Image (cartoon, rainbow, N blue to C red):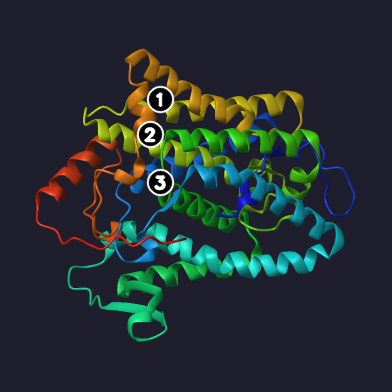
């Protein structure tokens, strides 16, 4: 995941102007409410479904299905790397032509977006294929060396259904590349967010606190201390943020006055919420208190961000409000229930589902954690083949 994704919410209703230099008319209250409500809903979808999918994230030999575990050392270094990347992008935009930089980035995210969207829609597309669909298996394998020194560089398994999903995703990719339409941008942004929540796993709650705490300082400094974050967010023409027009009611799909939310403000709290869902399941109490608590905390924190931003008419670092809510609420619940020790001793690397099959081959279940747990218990009760657990990187 690009460490420069933690962009602030930004309302441009009062400051933006069209290219002809005339002042843009202010958005209506209805349009603003629709934009903010849509951003909130779009932020919740990848967190909820990404958390569910993270529980069943495969540990098979296909690197596309294996999660990347974030250790405490990774978490401590992440804000520093993010700051260097953000400052580098800022300097690039100041020194070089913004047009050529965005052209290069568009091609880069064009490829990444197609792959991310294809992986996202695969589980949903499977139920539309007929039973007699000629589904063939393929394997893309690159190795280095020979004999005993031979090692795998790329080992990717896919099938005909995956190729169909890739083709559909390519249509969206071409639409985004040619038009830069905000709907295509959001489709890619949602795919990036869901894949991030699904495939990035925090090793434990302490690591999550380190990561969120560090990015809390990072977000506040770069938004309130400088104009770097806002400048990059406005200049960066790539699907690293969700946008929604505040003048949709007046201009329809051709609206151009956007409110936006950086993907980092979705993925970073999202991987922590997903960790708490896996912790809930590890307790084997058939209750999902910490998941629902942290999910509600995210709604509260993002809603507070939108409210403060609208009142003060200034871009806000969303993590300033999200981090205390997403950490504080679950810890408070753990204190009340006397489960603080269990929470901080839980290790995600010792998950209760170490050998689940690929997500695209699971039967369809409803979207609640309870039904998810029932489906997993039934799957574990049947015979399954043990797969090697080789570490991989995204």
Residue 229, image x, y percentages = 74, 44
Residue 168, image x, y percentages = 44, 68
Tag 2 near tag 1, CB within 8 Å = yes
Query: Sequence order check: which comes first, mark 2 or mark 1?
Result: 2
Label 3: how many Cα within 10 Å (few below 14, some 14–19, many 20+): many
List the residue tagged with mark 1: 293
List the residue tagged with mark 2: 276
Q: Residue furthest right?
A: 21
Quarter of the image holding residue 152? Answer: bottom left
Query: Sequence order check: which comes first, mark 2 or mark 3?
Result: 3
Tell me the element at label 2.
helix
Can you see residue 44? no
Query: Sequence order check: which comes first, mark 1 or mark 3?
Result: 3
Label 2: how many Cα within 10 Å (few below 14, some 14–19, many 20+): many
Q: Is residue 77 left or right of residue 224?
A: left
Q: Is residue 254 left or right of residue 116?
A: right
Q: Is residue 248 left or right of residue 293?
A: right
Residue 204, image x, y percentages = 41, 38
Number of the label disc, if any, that sits on residue 50: 3
Instruction: Indicate which label's residue lies in the foreground, 2 or 1.
Output: 2
Q: CA distance from mark 1 to mark 3?
A: 16 Å
Q: CA distance from mark 2 to mark 1?
A: 9 Å
Q: Residue furthest top?
A: 336
Tag 2 near tag 3, CB within 8 Å = no
Quarter of the image holding residue 2? Answer: bottom right
Residue 35 lies, with reference to residue 113, above or below; the image says above
In front: 78, or 32? 78
Can you see residue 96? yes
In front: 115, or 342? 342
Q: Is residue 225 left or right of residue 388?
A: right
Q: CA distance from mark 2 to mark 3?
A: 13 Å
């Amino acid at each position: 995941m690009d460490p420069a994704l933690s962009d602030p919410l930004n309302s441009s209703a009062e400051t933006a102007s069209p290219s002809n230099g005339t002042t843009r008319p202010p958005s209506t209250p209805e349009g603003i409410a629709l934009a903010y409500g849509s951003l909130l809903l779009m932020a919740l979808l990848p967190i909820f479904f990404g958390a569910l999918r993270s529980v069943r994230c495969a540990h098979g030999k296909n690197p596309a299905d294996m999660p990347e575990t974030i250790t405490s050392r990774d978490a401590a270094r992440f804000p520093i790397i993010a700051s260097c990347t953000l400052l580098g992008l800022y300097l690039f935009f100041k020194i070089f032509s913004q047009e050529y930089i965005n052209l290069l980035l568009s091609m880069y995210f064009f490829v990444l977006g197609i792959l991310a969207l294809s992986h996202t829609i695969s589980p949903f597309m499977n139920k539309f294929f007929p039973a007699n669909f000629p589904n063939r298996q393929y394997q893309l394998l690159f190795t280095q060396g020979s004999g005993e020194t031979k090692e795998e560089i790329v080992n990717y398994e896919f099938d005909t259904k995956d190729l169909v999903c890739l083709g559909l995703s390519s249509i969206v990719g071409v639409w985004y590349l040619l038009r830069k339409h905000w709907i295509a941008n959001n489709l890619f942004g949602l795919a990036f967010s869901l894949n991030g929540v699904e495939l990035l796993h925090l090793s434990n709650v302490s690591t999550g606190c380190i990561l969120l705490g560090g990015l809390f300082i990072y977000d506040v400094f770069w938004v309130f201390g400088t104009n770097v974050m806002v400048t990059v967010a406005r200049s960066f023409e790539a699907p690293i943020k969700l946008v929604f027009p505040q003048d949709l009611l007046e201009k329809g799909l051709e609206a151009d006055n956007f409110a936006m939310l950086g993907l980092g403000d979705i993925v970073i709290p999202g991987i922590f919420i997903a960790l708490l869902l896996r912790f809930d399941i590890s307790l084997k109490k058939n209750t999902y208190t910490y998941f629902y608590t942290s999910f509600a905390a995210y709604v509260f924190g993002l809603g507070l961000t939108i409210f403060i931003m609208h009142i003060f008419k200034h871009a806000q670092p969303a993590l300033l409000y999200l981090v205390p809510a997403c950490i504080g609420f679950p810890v408070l619940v753990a204190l009340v229930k006397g489960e603080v020790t269990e929470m901080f001793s839980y290790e995600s690397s010792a998950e209760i589902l170490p050998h689940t099959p690929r997500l695209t081959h699971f039967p369809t279940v409803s979207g609640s954690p309870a039904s998810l747990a029932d489906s997993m218990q039934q799957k574990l009760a049947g015979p399954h083949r043990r797969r090697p657990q080789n570490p991989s990187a995204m």
